[in-house]
């Protein structure tokens, strides 16, 4: 009985962070760099070699601006760390990806529609649409995590979620 009491004292609380997923600098720079470089090249082509047709010029400038804006979105989205607690998967700033009680199953298989180095969470109840490019997205009953993250961290979080779900099934 004494050993059981010791194990309960060492068990993490519902808001204690069990694992984190941090975007890797190399993946982050690659994603932002390629998208930003494409935007700069398109704007440069529009400025240095403007096409005769005004529609093509507008297309090049607009697409270049969209690429630069997207690179900024990826940069800001991947500046966040994801945290897993017994109650939720969330961003460090507090925005919730999903509540653990709403999770139906986790899919990290090779054939799952998921980001690179990531996994997909299937929810019981649908959530609002959110997209943090390069880190995670939520649409309907799916939450996908990955992209600029390390495969080992994503796999560890997916396995911990499976353990939490198995504990929940047992009662």
Image: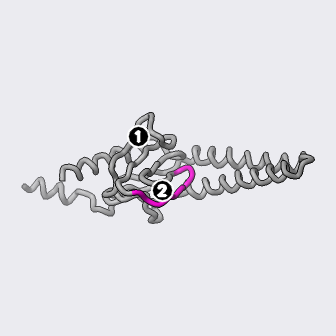
Determine the image quadrant of residue 12.
Answer: bottom left
Q: Give the residue drawn at x 48%, y 51%.
A: 22
Q: Is residue 83 left or right of residue 2?
A: right
Q: Are marks 2 and 1 in contact (CB under 8 Å)?
A: no
Foreground label between 2 and 1: 1
Is 59 part of what is drawn in magenta?
no
Q: Is residue 89 left or right of residue 24?
A: left
* Whole-number angstrom distance, CA of label 2 to CA of label 1: 20 Å
Element type at marker 2?
loop
Determine the image quadrant of residue 99.
Answer: bottom left
Main SS category, magenta section: strand
Q: Give the residue drawn at x 45%, y 61%.
A: 92
Q: Position of residue 42 (x, y in %)?
A: 79, 47
Residue closest to the eye, 99 or 85 = 99
Q: Is residue 27 left or right of residue 157?
A: right
Dot 1, crowdedness within 10 Å: few (<14), some or many (≥20)?
many
Q: Position of residue 4 (x, y in %)?
A: 12, 54
Element type at marker 1?
loop
Q: Give the residue drawn at x 41%, y 40%.
A: 108
- The numbered dot on residue 81 is 2
Q: Position of residue 113 (x, y in %)?
A: 48, 41
Residue closest to the eye, 68 or 55 = 55
Q: Give the residue drawn at x 29%, y 62%.
A: 14
Outermost residue, right side: 52
- The numbered dot on residue 108 is 1
Query: Mark 2 or mark 1, which has the lower sequence index?
Result: 2
Q: Position of residue 48 (x, y in %)?
A: 89, 48
Query: Which portion, as a residue range, is magenta?
Result: 126-135
Dot 2, crowdedness within 10 Å: few (<14), some or many (≥20)?
some
Quarter of the image with the N terminus in it: bottom left
């Amino acid at each position: 009985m004494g050993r059981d009491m010791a194990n309960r004292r060492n068990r993490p609380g519902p808001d204690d962070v069990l694992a984190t997923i941090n975007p890797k600098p190399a993946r982050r720079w690659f994603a932002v760099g390629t998208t930003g470089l494409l935007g700069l090249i398109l704007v440069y082509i529009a400025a240095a070699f403007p096409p005769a047709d005004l529609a093509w010029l507008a297309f090049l400038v607009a697409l270049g601006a969209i690429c630069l804006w997207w690179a900024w979105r990826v940069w800001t989205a991947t500046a966040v760390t994801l945290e897993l607690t017994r109650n939720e998967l969330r961003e460090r700033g507090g925005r919730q990806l999903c509540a653990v009680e709403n999770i139906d199953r986790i899919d990290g298989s090779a054939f799952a529609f998921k980001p690179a180095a990531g996994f997909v969470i299937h929810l019981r109840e649908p959530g609002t649409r959110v997209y943090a490019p390069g880190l995670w997205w939520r649409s309907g009953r799916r939450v996908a995590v990955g992209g600029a993250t390390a495969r080992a961290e994503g796999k560890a979080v997916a396995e911990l979620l499976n353990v939490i779900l198995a504990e929940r099934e047992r009662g």
